[in-house]
Amino acid sequence: MLAGAVSAALLGGSPALAGTPQDPSAAKLQLPSPPGGEDVRVLVFHGSAGEEPPTVDAGIEAIEQIGRSGPAAQRFTITATADPSVFTSEKLGKFNAVVFLTGGGDVLDPAQESGLESYMEAGGGFLGIHGAAGAEPYSDWFSGLVGARPVAGGPGKAQRATVEVGDRRSPAAKGLPAEWKRPDRWLNWEKNPSGSVHTVTRVRERSYDPGQGAMGWDHPISWCRDYDGGRSFYTGMGGTADSFQEADFRTHLRGALLWTTRLARADCQATITSNYKAERVTSPNKPGESDQIGEPHGLATADDGRIFYIGRGGGDGDAPVVTDWADPQIGKGQGTVHVYDPETKKVSLVGSLTVFGNKGGGDELVKVEEGLLGIALDPDFADNGWMYLHYTPHSQLDRDKHMAERRVSRFTVDAETGKLDESSEKVLLKWPVQVHSCCHAGGGMAFDSRRNLYIATGDNNSSRFSDGYSGNNPEPSFKGVSFADARRTAGNTNNLNGKILRIHPEDDGTYTLPEGNLFTGKETDEGGGKTRGEIYVMGVRNPARISIDTKTDVLYAGWVGPDAGAPSTTWGPAKYDTFARITHAGNQGWPYCMGNKQPYRDRNLPDPETPLGWYDCDHLKNESPNNDGLVNIPPAQPNNIWYSPQGGAPDYPRDENGVPSYKTDEQKLLLPWLKGGGQATMDGPVYRFDKSVASKAKWPAYWDGKWFVGDFYDAEQPRHAVVMPDGDEPGALPVHAESLRKIIPVGEGGIRNLMDWKFAPDGSLYVLDYGRGFFTSDDKSALWHVTYQGGKATPAAGDVVGKSAKGASR
């Protein structure tokens, strides 16, 4: 035994076995609150019911060296013992933290466990390492203390795996790589503790063989929580003696000890589900009215906290619709703008626009996704009242050619009345769209810090006529306008559909073009006149939502994919819904390539059903007869996140030309936390924590820098916060994902059909639930508010140890 395994004499008592009878009435200890003092001391308990684990000596030595090293103000001394009688000794109150370095089993009798409870109730700190999760197997209280129990059978041999460090702010994670590769004996849990504890790290199961009891993508391996008055940290690492020699693992232990000993503060509440409240803030509409909400389609937050949200133009389920092109009223609807005031908790109608967008559901030659599609508030909205709306005015409908006009206009909201002044409209930008066939209108808008306005537009293309694969069938058309060939739109350098545009609105209602867009509009290539300078991103299918990171000005976007349920060795990938972090102008690939540059098969006249060659994602050509832009177009950029009914980020072996096999039995899922099916991406914000905002409802700093990605549907589809790697490498995969499905609740009674989500200036989250129908509003259409209800970081500021350097002897 190491010298670190101190005899019970140092604790002022004689050895006692765990099973020695004790008087339960004497078990409750009178301890100082919080225990320990400025001269920080740590008790390392290594008693085991069976043979002592081989990790004990290495663990004691490592913890002792941690206490002797580092900044003087963070040093501590340790006392190590296998004698459980310390838990009935008043001297327990002299320790700032207790470490369980046990091999499991029933190591404490009832009185001794009661003593540990008293210690925690007094504000003590606990650190459990690896096998400690198996200690006190019959105690519900101890189960809560450690957070989870390992599955029967224990871990097998040590395996090298990747640990995802999700909480970059935790003292136990500072300095660790985001993807930490290390060997250990990995534990599986009887019940996943996610949501009841604050997870600090997860182990990536696809990086090793998890064996029986595998947890899936969400496999917590270290966590913390404020428990029963004290602080509890558990790490499932440390299952080998060699672990304690690793510099990074010692860094991990040091951080855990800093928090449990009160030498540092940490937020161990940020991902605990019960610390969040999701509340519906709008009521169902009155019958036949849209007094609370229209057909939800987007929201914007004002600096004063008000939430403006739009309705596309579909009426309630009982409202009549006109679908006859001979009728001048065809598709006429009211695009609504409402505002919710969190101060008064009241909703009011700001205004409405008469739009082409109300044709109900049904076949793609009947339904329509046009209408009021997007909203953005001017950066100086508080002073000028300017609101930008992206919509399809009914007045510009050409019923003969089945064409319409899309426009982005600036309106003024009257400061006194709070109403939209329709006469104030300044049309910034307009362009034609075909409305013979549905769908893919896009609509999202966002400003960056340089006052550039980003506008997302869909590819204005039918989902039919290509069997759900690439939308590249040049044949179907109406009066000379193709409606099934996205090479006319998204893949066309001279068309504003299927793009993310970037313009700079001017005060006079015009716009200029910022530097750095994909084109200037003045290119002379191929004879000139074949580009549009408004295009920042081309090759997107249906980007309903986009967002700008307020710290970095980076664009984040998501778009809906086609309809094929499985990959085809003839035509290419299955439907991929896509998210991308876009750091510079480029082509995201549609309708030529998807995912990480996975190509589709070309088709063309005279027989679009005959497959031609595979597209070359690095050397793309638009050879469609419907193209009036450049033939030689920018190469496809890889995307960061894509998913299909098969799962997240499907990838395949590739041949010598870089073409994937598209065979499902050869498929590899790079992002196993993702699953599709019925799917429709809803890009969310990158959260930025503002410590200057005095708000009890704001989400914690843990979420800072995390990108929220979601889906309209709520079965297995994504509703996550992801961590992207540092840098701006195109196509880099997330290094970590955190489920939000319990915090932003799914299922009956929850937010089932996520339509938009944004953080307000106070740091709380607002979410639009579309409702349960399509092309209409119903009694489930609602605005929700998700607030944080947890407490501050612990320990309390007044309880943090602020000692000077002390010696590190035992």
Image: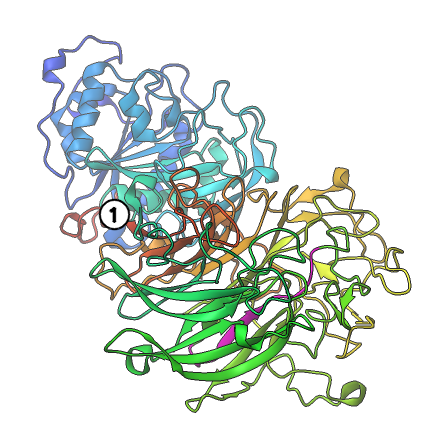
**Residue 453 painted magenta:** yes
Give the residue pinned by disc 1: 789
Residue 740 drawn at (x, y percent): 42, 46
Q: Nearer the viewer, residue 735 or 377?
A: 377
- Residue sitting at 48 percent across and 67 percent down? 372
Residue 147, horizontal then vertical, whole percent: 35, 31
- Which element carries disc 1, helix, strand or loop? loop
Percent position (x, y) of residue 501?
57, 76
Q: Amino acid at mark 1?
A: Gln
Q: Is residue 554 visible?
A: no
**Residue 750 percent location from the top left of the image:** 39, 42
Q: Nearer the viewer, residue 346 or 358?
A: 358
Span shown in magenta: 449-463
Q: Is residue 776 left or right of residue 92?
A: right
The quadrant of the image that shows the N terminus is top left
Question: Could you tell me which residue is drawn at 64 percent across and 86 percent down?
Answer: 520
The structure residue drawn at horizontal position 57% and vertical position 65%, both measured from the top left corner, is 330
Few, some or many C-alpha atoms within 10 Å of disc 1 (few <14, some 14-19, many ≥20)? some
